[in-house]
Amino acid sequence: MIREAVKGDEVALEGFLAQHSATTMFMRGNLRDFGLNNREAPYAMRYFLTETAGEVTGVGAIANIGTLMAQADESLGEIVAHMVGAAGPDFRPFGILAPPYIVAALRDAFEVGQQPTKMNDIEPHFQLNKAALKMPPMDGFSLRKPTMDDLPVLAAWNHAYSAEVLGGQDEERSRAEAEQTILSGQQRVLVKDGEIVSQTRFNAVLPDAVQVGGVYTPACWRGRGFSRRAVASHLAEAFAGGVENAILFSASESASSVYRAIGFEQIGEYQIILFE
């Protein structure tokens, strides 16, 4: 049976997604933040379930902004076909985020295999249990939440990060996203000698897990261990609050070396596509 999730399905849906948390943090986070049947928030999602004997066995999701995601094995073909019908003939995906085999199924089903992309990366997928965290020395460094006084610097960093990792965007959007990130409360900046030298944030926060994203150190300060101090310190804060695990996707081998240095281990691959 395949159907769209409705009010009352939250517990069963979260239960299934939590079993596959490493690959479903975006779906879990959006479910927690926006609930079901929210048609206004850009990142709110419609969720589609397959069920066997009353148990959820697969999930597909379409965000209001147009992003596609799924977590399923045997029922994957059925779910993506149902998603195509639910989206309607005029729907055009904004992006696809999932393990590569799921991305391939979604691209085929939505017939966007030839659509131009501004980002199409298969990235190493890392996980860290709190017991494995390796804290670097923090003498001379501190971590804090950013404030609006930091916005000019962080907006410039966000613009540079977008150009380097996500294919670029205009400066106005970079500034708006930087402001939203500050207001979210999930960003941290590393400070040395009174100057911010690196940033990190959590893209998704659940009681048991966090997803790290937006890690950035300006090129002039790279190679000095700033990123690993920022990420490790932010994770130590989350672990002290009860979180057990962290996941992330790495955009480069140099970034991967940072994450391995603080205890992350690669568990697979994750593909991120953003269409032109």
Image (spheres, rainbow, N blue to C red):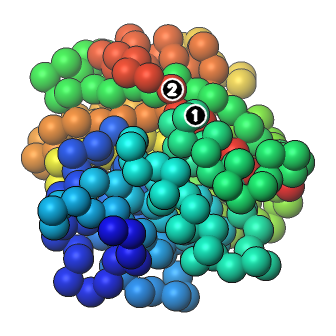
**Callout 2: SS:** strand
Compared with residue 268, is residue 272 higher up or lower down, i.e. above or below? below
Q: Quadrant of the C terminus?
A: bottom right
Q: Quarter-wise, where is residue 145 in the image? A: bottom left
Compared with residue 124, is residue 9 higher up or lower down, i.e. above or below? below
Q: What type is the residue that disc 1 sits on?
A: Pro
Q: Residues within 10 Å of mark 1 (few under 14, many from 20)?
A: some
User: Residue 158, image x and y in percent?
Assistant: 68, 50
* Residue 128 visible in the picture: yes
Compared with residue 218, is residue 155 higher up or lower down, i.e. above or below? below
* Side of 26 relative to 12 (left or right): right
Q: Residue at x 45, y 86 (%)?
A: 38
Q: Considering only order in the chain, which callout, 2 or 1, is on the residue closer to the N terminus?
A: 1
Q: Residue at x 15, y 62 (%)?
A: 53
User: Residue 113, image x and y in percent?
Assistant: 80, 45
In terms of depth relative to the viewer, which is nearer, 22 or 100? Answer: 100
**Callout 1: SS:** helix
Q: What type is the residue that disc 2 sits on?
A: Glu
**In the rendered image, which residue does mark 2 sit on?**
269
Contact between labelled residues 2 and 1, with CB atoms less than 8 Å apart: yes
